[in-house]
Amino acid sequence: MRSTASILHLDMDAFFASVEQRDKPSLVGKAVIVGGVSGRGVVATASYEARKFGVHSAMAGSQARRLAPNAAFLSGRFEAYRESSKVVMATLRELSPLVEPLSLDEAFVDLEAGGIDVEDLDVVHHVAAQLRARVAERTEGLGCSVGIGSSKFMAKVASEMAKPQRGHTDQIALITPGSEADTIAPLPARAIPGVGPVTAERLEKLGLRTIADVRAARESELVHELGHAAGTSLVALSRAWDDRPVVASRIAKSISVEDTFERDLTDHEECRRIVEHHAVLVCGRLKKSGQFARTVTLKAKMADFTVWSRSVTLTGATDSLERISQLAVRMLDSLELREGVRLLGVGVSNFAASAQEELFVVDGDGKLLDEPEVTVSPIQPGPFGRRRSFDGRTWSPGADLIHDDYGRGWVWGSGHGIVTCRFEYRGSEIGRVKSVRQDDEALHPAHPLPLAWKPPGEDVLSDAGS
Ligand code: TTP
Ligand code: MG
């Protein structure tokens, strides 16, 4: 256990949405929703303006549209998010060699390993303020929240306290060494690392809602309910005992969500709903990591404890919820449910750094499952639908474009052979909206406008698995 505020956690504010507002001057101060463009997709993130309407991550696009009908729904530009993420991670590595990215937009830093005088809280606060200024300058305007504490748990709790919607002034929160246990006492049990919705619900059933409640519970009761490993770790964390080290560039090789049921399930409909829900969570974490998966796995533990698992490997890589969910459900169809199933899990693995169009699907043994098929994005009604033109170019809402006569801009919407564009870019005046024909030869898809500041060397996270 450390006694100094030597671990820092940085988390970008409304990351994808802020990148969009930064690069699209007309969206500054507006409700922006990334993801959920097609009614069936889910929201990746919402700008703080959109969160006021109740929109949040993992919400169905159709619900987001009902709550915030006037928001800009964009399909996301991973190239831009990845570039800004690299800049942030490189900036963190200037503080310390020990930087552990958790996703595109958050990381832990071991300040002590960077030779910073962590005994002096003024020094630590100054380092954090300078860091935020550097991040804003190098990403050309992105905000972040910084938390500092004596452990990973405390640093993460602190960065959450520093978020702008909490009314914090300088977006830096420091949990003073010695005050850890008191600070976390009133927080919900869900704030404890490793406590997901399922565990939280079990704790709730035991009448344990806050961390103080968990702390007051008997260890034997928690161990009985959650098993030895989870029970004892919960006891320690509820007392703010956390000595997990910051590990440089640990990269997940797979992402999965699984759940054990209180009774064995035999109903196919019920299993399908669970698998679809797992797919939403897995896909959210996949998107957050900025990666694309080639393999989707479904795992089941039967009533007699035998474990069943199936996987399919795509020839391409995807982060599409529709695709992942569809494949998982298809594998479920081949599971014999009669004996009852006590656990279902959905996972993705075999990551690539960019999406690749898939041509056909093979199973775990490399056997071809489908006739070779070319996947075409679903055509959606309305101005924000994703459309594919006859020459194969997609004009997804939010995508960058360049028109030979009107200059740089982005796709506002498309359909009926027309692409509606707003001609503006990072640092420009608010641009005009113009509609051009989809087959206009002067219209080209474009890469995002690059940032001026370039990280030295290369970034480990973004190259994961590719
Ligand atoms: P978060 O840090 O969870 O959210 P945020 O940065 O948008 O907002 P906050 O200010 O509250 O931190 O996630 C970072 C990015 O990861 C987010 O902008 C979009 C992406 N993401 C998904 O694609 N799906 C998800 O389910 C989540 C939670 C995030
Ligand atoms: Mg964030």
Image (cartoon, helix red, strand yellow):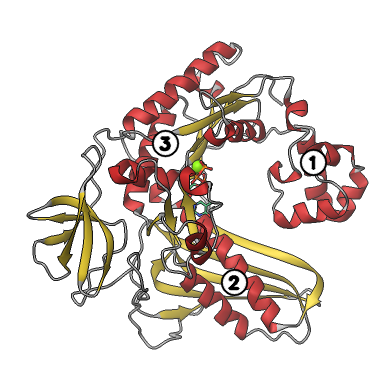
- What amino acid is found at the position of numbered circle 2 in the picture? Glu
N-terminal label among 1 and 3 = 3
Ligand 1 neighbours mark 3 (CB distance < 8 Å) = no
Q: Which residue is mark 3?
A: 89
Tell me: 442 left or right of 109. Answer: left
- What amino acid is found at the position of numbered circle 1 in the picture? Thr
Q: Which residue is mark 1?
A: 210
User: Which residue is located at x 42 percent, y 73 percent?
Assistant: 314
At numbered mark 3, what does the secondary structure look like: helix, strand or loop? helix
In the displayed structure, 18 sits above or below 416; it is: above
Assess disc 2: are there few (<14), some (14-19) or many (≥20) residues with their C-alpha within 10 Å of its C-alpha: many
- What amino acid is found at the position of numbered circle 3 in the picture? Met
N-terminal label among 3 and 2 = 3
In the displayed structure, 134 sits above or below 195; it is: above
Distance from label 3 to label 2 (Cα)? 33 Å
Tell me: 58 left or right of 226. Answer: left
Tell me: 145 left or right of 71. Answer: right
At numbered mark 1, what does the secondary structure look like: helix, strand or loop? loop
At numbered mark 2, what does the secondary structure look like: helix, strand or loop? helix
User: Which residue is located at x 41 percent, y 64 percent?
Assistant: 37
Q: Which residue is mark 2?
A: 276
Please provide percent x and percent y for residue 411. 26, 58
| Quarter of the rendering occupied by the N terminus | top right
In the displayed structure, 405 sits above or below 61; it is: above
